[in-house]
Amino acid sequence: MHDLTRRTLFAGAAAAGLLPTISRAQTTPAPKHGGTLNTILTPEPPILVLGVNNQGPTQLAAGKLFEGLLQYTFKLEPLPQLAKSWSLSDDKKTYTFKLQDNVKFHDGQPMTADDVIFSITKFHLELSPRARLIFSMIKEATSPDPHTVVLTLAQPFDPFLLMFDVTACAIVPRHIYAGTDYRTNPANQHPIGTGPFQFVEWQRGNFIRLKKFDQYWTAGEPYLDEIIYNIIPDSQSRALALETGKVQLTQANDIEPFDIPRFKAKPNLEVELHGWEYASQLSWIEINHRVKPLDDIRVRQAISHALDRNFILNKLWFGIGKVATGPIASTTRFYDPKVAKLQAYDPNKAKALLDAAGLKPNAKGVRFTIKQLALPYGEVWTRLSEYFRTALGHVGIEVVLETTDAGAWAKRIGDWDYETSTNFLSQFGDPTLGVERSYVSTNIKKITFTNTGGYTNPKVDDLFATARQSGDSAVRAKAFSDVQAILCDEVPQLWLMELAWPTIHEKKLHDVITTAMGPNAGFSGVWIG
Amino acid sequence: MKLFLRAYARNKGAIAGIIVVLLVCLIAALASWVFPYSPWDMQGAPFQPPGDPDLWLGSDSLGRDVAAGIAYGARVSLLIGAVSTAAALCLGVTLGAIAGYASGALDDAIMRFTEFFQTVPSFILAIVLVAIFSPSLGSIVSAIAVVSWPPVTRVVRAEFLSLRSREFVQAAEVLGHSHTTIIWREILPNALAPVIVLASLMVANAILLESGLSFLGLGDPNLISWGYMIGAGRSVIRLAWWMSVFPGLAIFLTVLALNLVGEGLGDALNPRLARRR
Amino acid sequence: MSLLSVQDLTIALPPGADRPHAVAGVSFTLDPGEVLCIVGESGSGKSLSAAAIMGLLPPVLRRERGTIEFEGRDLLALSQTEMRAFRGARLGMIFQEPMTALNPLMRVGDQIAEVLAVHNAGGARDRVPELLAAVNLPDPTRLARAWPHLLSGGQRQRVMIAMALALEPTLLIADEPTTALDVTTQMQILRLIKDIQQRRGMGVLFITHDFGVVAEIADRVAVMQEGRIVEAGGTTQVLDAPEHPYTRALIAAVPHRMAAHIPAEGRPVLEVVGVRKTFRRGAGLFGGGTTVHAVADADFVLRKGETLGLVGESGSGKSTLARCVVRLVQPDEGAIRFHDTNLARLDRRGWKPFRKRIQMVFQDPFASLNPRRRVSEIIADGPIAAGTPRIEALHRVGELLSLVQLDPSAADRFPHEFSGGQRQRIGIARALAMDPELLIADEPVSALDVSVQAQVLDLLEELRQRLGLTMLFITHDLRVAAQICSRIAVMQHGRIVEQGETAQVFNTPRHPYTQSLLDSIPGRSWASPVTSLSRAAGEGWGGGNVTTNTAQPHQVTNP
Amino acid sequence: MTLSPTSPSPRGRGVGGWGHLASLAAQRLLKIVAVILAIAVTNFLLIHAAPGDPASVIAGESGAADPQFMAQLRAQFGLDQPLSTQLAIYLNHVLHGDLGTSFRQGRPVAALIFERLPATLLLTGCAFAFAIVAGIALGAMAANRVGRITDSVITVLALGFYATPLFWVGLMLVLLLSVWLNWLPSFGMETVGAGYTGLTAIADVAQHLILPALTLGLFYMAVYARLTRASMLEVSAQDFVRTARAKGVPEGRILRRHILRNALLPVITFAGIQAGQLIGGSILVETVFAWPGIGRLAFDALLARDYQVLLGVFLVTSILVVLFNLLTDLLYAVIDPRVQTA
């Protein structure tokens, strides 16, 4: 049940028991104060201000320094953070946020509605392409009093409340950024936020040290004295650090999948796979529909049949994650398990489909040759491309691998200069936010993470448009179900897996993953006992 | 020649070296007969430890046969070693010959050029080149060649300089031979001994360089090479030690053997040193 | 009691060598205050005998039998430590190569002081300058602080002597100590050794291959051949009345004739006018370096059929001048007129026709033949390059080999299969293959043993006469020059200081340098008994009395 | 008597004395400038040879690119100027110590590099010291016992390390000493957050240093051992060694004062040439051991294809090598009196 909007109407007034809560273990003893958390950050982020940089590592560390208005439960229901309550007008256009009292920035200045409005309508609007897309719908932003923010949209937008967590809209101090070049502001080297931890030092290539913010707005929190992000580029060194107890927490892709089973078996460690529901990353083989014969639906179906997704999940990712069933991840709102079904692994069927498409094997058994631009994000992705080559080889499709660096990869995808590639995208909780962009013809742009493959289906365009424009959940659910059915049949991209990123921590570290923000959360409630 | 062979055969290490090198060549040549499938093909369950009769060196993270990988990898390692060495030799010998024969300003210019390349940290230069021109067989071979020719030039130049003033070369001059004849017939054949020794060491070095590049993720993605296998295996070394141990051993043995061959050649071609061993 | 007594010394060669023993049954004695010369050609075992006495035999060589008694003690019975105490203290030694015999990283004073230190003798501070002064080195205190590379060869040999004398040994072993030195320096060192030996009453065991040196310094002589002493006795007796055929052959091979004078008639074949050549050494990108005036203004004329000897010490510029003539070196200034053409003006292409007419024979028989080519190719390459059909050129090879008294079957072999003398003949055949009219011979015999030297000289003379060659003969050895050249030009510091007919230059030198060169010929007062020349002072070699050398003693072994 | 043209000049250190050393140094400094220029030009050419201009790469990564943003970036990097102007600007920057800005980190490349430089210098310095001391000792031992068992063992060992990939040795050492035996820390440069000061801090860094320095050093130890052995054998056969024996100098003293000192000259020369390889090797070692030096910086830059940083590292390491060569040249000149008059 993902009826977000209605539920939030009551949020401000509702008693605590009715509210979705942070999923804290109820049986553990009272939290203790003190201690240093050593963890890992990799690769080293360029900068620690969200908005100026939104890469994964930045989110991890800056999530402790900054906060958003909201956070979300594992089921993507909003929870208070800097906003203590919120409400939506009946025309579903006006959102009113009541802010927490006594919130201070790390430099001692109070945080007010001005900072929030600045962050939304100036800072992120300018810096973040993703925020720009949504926040540009805001017609008017006002603050009746220093602790109230009123945002009025031009039209109803159902997933609007999913845009207020720290990774999407961190609240930054207006008095520091207003009127400056946000990208080069000197404060970027010494970030100032409202988060439970404040920045202390950063030895490049070595570590980042954060310490407890004494004037944090929740009395008694945070519990930890310090968080140290060690920068360890080598995966084996990272695993070793966790093994030897030098770090107590790893997250995201710190630990390679093949090491997970080993750590699962350790009695002193806990492996948690949730906490990524907001991102819900889905991986797929990216297909350029401009390349023959990939524009042929039978060919795509054949390739889909040729891929053993269970092998990928179990042998490459060591069982971490789920086999994809369609364009929408099972943790994202409006996922419809009834229609989301992909082509089963069946090489013979694949060959038959290819034969039907008129692609007969030549003397060497090769039907056609395509290129695969491997995703340069680490070993497992290289392995995936190698698997893709082998699997397709078995049905007579020759795959030639190309490797490149992250920059050139992004550039080539953006320039449509590829035949096939590998990709994974976040869904941000709602298909309108994170799924639509990859399939609608209006978003065929020479920009990375748009519909770069060039898939066009007017019906799909219409269905996504309906879902976007409607404020009615039932209408949206119907549209998304229909779109899932069409996409699963036409396989514009070859979805592979719903990725899960294990968070591994020592058992004595408590309350680590409590929201859908996972390890990106502020950690104000994390304690060592 | 007979004398040379006898001198070479006196060195036990060199004999062992040549046997190993020939063995590696044999493995490379027979790879497609012994393993009649692509080394990229899955041949069994992933992470099978060695000892299985079908996968006697075990399988890797995708169930690929490590033994097949090593056999096919021998091709790539030898190919990269040989081609990059050949390229470096061409460049190095040409420049060295010109510098040593011409002397004067041209020599000076060539030597500054050579010195420059010798000063620059070669591994970093190789990385920069492969990274910028994106990893492929061609870029790897070129990068290795680019960083390994300077010693050849120096050696050849030194030989040419010394041979140029040797009396038989002066005699050729006095007999009225052309520069080409003097270079090709009189000097070059006599300058080759140290180049041959150097070449065997360069092949070894090239294999090491390639493995280092692959280790850093700069290998050709379509070719299985020993360096790639270690790169792929190093992260799972605790889970599957055989994935990186065997290719590592292959590199070690090949490089060692090539070095032994080089030493043997050096001794055989330079009897003055050999006697002291 | 004799100072040193060597009895039946036999040293085995490792298996596979050309003979079983390096030294076989060698016995000799040396009394205090006596100079014993061991003379022999290379490989005769003379140096190894000296090394055996010092206990410095290479480990692969083993003493098979025999004793070496020194001051009544058997040196061979001593332990390493005891022997070490003898070396440097009681036994001093100097070597052939002064350029490499000193540690380049130690100041010369320190190297001398080290002798004192390791033998626990003090007073190095005073002794070192004293010793340097004793070997007639200037400014000993300053020189003691000099590095070896700043010293000339003669100075270094003096340092070596000073070092050997530091602890006043009773026996000095000198292994070819003057062979690597120029003739004037050689004479100084010989005199120094003789002088010190006489003053201190040392015994000196002097190893040499040069009978002139023997005549100069020895009291007694032992002649070694292939590891054996074939003849021994007093110097005068052995030199003037040799008994053993080998000794006689060796002495006969010492150049001893004065070449017949050929009247300087006919047209000049070669005229060298005002030739200069300056080398810049060590000049880098940023300047620096030194200039050496290798040839500074040389003039000479060479007429048809004559042989001009260009003599001088090393560094005098004689080789550079010869190389200017064949354009191995490009002269800076001056004219080199060959008949009517100024060769100095020609470019490479213009030179080509003259390559046939001017040929050269080189010094080092081991370096002058391309080791990777067969003899036939080496000889035929020149004519082929000059346009002779290949078949014809190869066909002539046998003829040329016969001409230089080699078996025509040599054509198919490689140079390394031949001895030094044979290779030099191949080199001569290569030059003759071009049918030159001017032959330039650059020290063609100085790398050869004395017996082989004589044969090659004879061959050259014979060919000159038979083929009517004109010859420019470069040598540092005045005896050789006297034997083969009809005229002599003496070079010093790049200049020709004197030239004239051989007899005139030798008998009435006009330039002081020529005089000092002549004075430095070792054993000048001794003339080989074979020619039984008059020994009138100032006469030297009397002209005219030419005897043909019939002795072919040290037959060159065929491969 | 005939004095050679090079008559002895025993004052001070031969002809030029210390003045000669100074002129040598000056000459080499000129060379350094030349090398810097040459590398800068090479760098410039490489940047322009790279597919895609930096602006489009950055734009591609930021996930959103509009023409205005691209133009802005191009202007920022001067990419809108003609090539020759760009080269001039670039050279001018390099000569003023400006190596450009990291696209990724938004910070000056020079600052990034100089932050990391001390760690690399510490690592390579220690590795080098270990390699040269151990290498020379082993080589001397082998040469001194040539043909015997010690010689064979050392020779085989040296050959073995010489033939093993560096990173491989590193992995094995980690596996053995860190994972199995847990004796030494396997990554990083210090125990972060331990707050050590003074001697404890030094001991802590030293502990972290052992494995990487050993890994990096072993290969070069093998190189120097082989070289020392060969060189000593060569020198042993020289005349002045025979002279020393004839003087009655004891073997130990001959070895130390005559053979070893002379044999070290080629080792020094070679060590100078090898300096560059040592720094190159540190990329591998710093990656395996997470050592926060410029090798690691280069690896990260490599992963991110941050060419400005990669090329900056290339330039700085080259300068280091030239400086090191200068040092060895000077050392050589101090040890070998012949150099000063050459």
Image (cartoon, coloured by chain):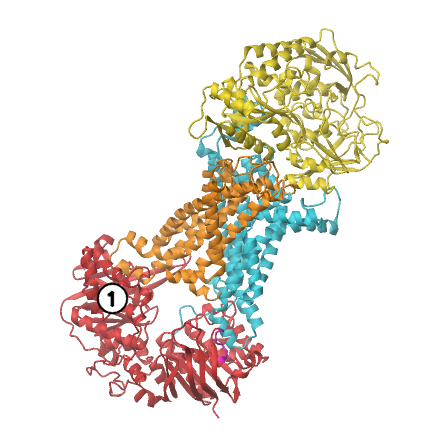
Chain colours: A yellow, B orange, C red, D cyan
Residue D59 visible (yes or no): no
Q: Quadrant of the C terminus of chain D?
A: bottom left
Q: Nearer the viewer, residue D71 or A26?
A: A26
Residue C350, by quadrant, is bottom left
Residue C270 covered by magenta stretch: no
Residue C365, by quadrant, is bottom left
Up/down of B222 relative to D293, above or below: above
Residue B259: x, y in percent?
49, 54
Read off the magenta span: C54-59
Q: Residue at x 48, y 66 (%)?
A: B276
User: Is A216 displayed left or right of C354 in the figure?
Assistant: right
Residue A248: x, y in percent?
74, 37
Residue lying farthest to the top in this orientation: A91
Q: Residues within 10 Å of mark 1 (few under 14, many from 20)?
A: few
The kind of residue tagged 1 is: Ser
Up/down of C484 relative to D71, above or below: below
Q: Which residue is mark 1?
A: C409
Residue lying farthest to the front in this orientation: B53
User: Is C390 displayed left or right of C76 in the figure?
Assistant: left
Residue C341: x, y in percent?
18, 58
Q: Nearer the viewer, residue A323 or D337?
A: A323
Give the SS element for disc 1: helix
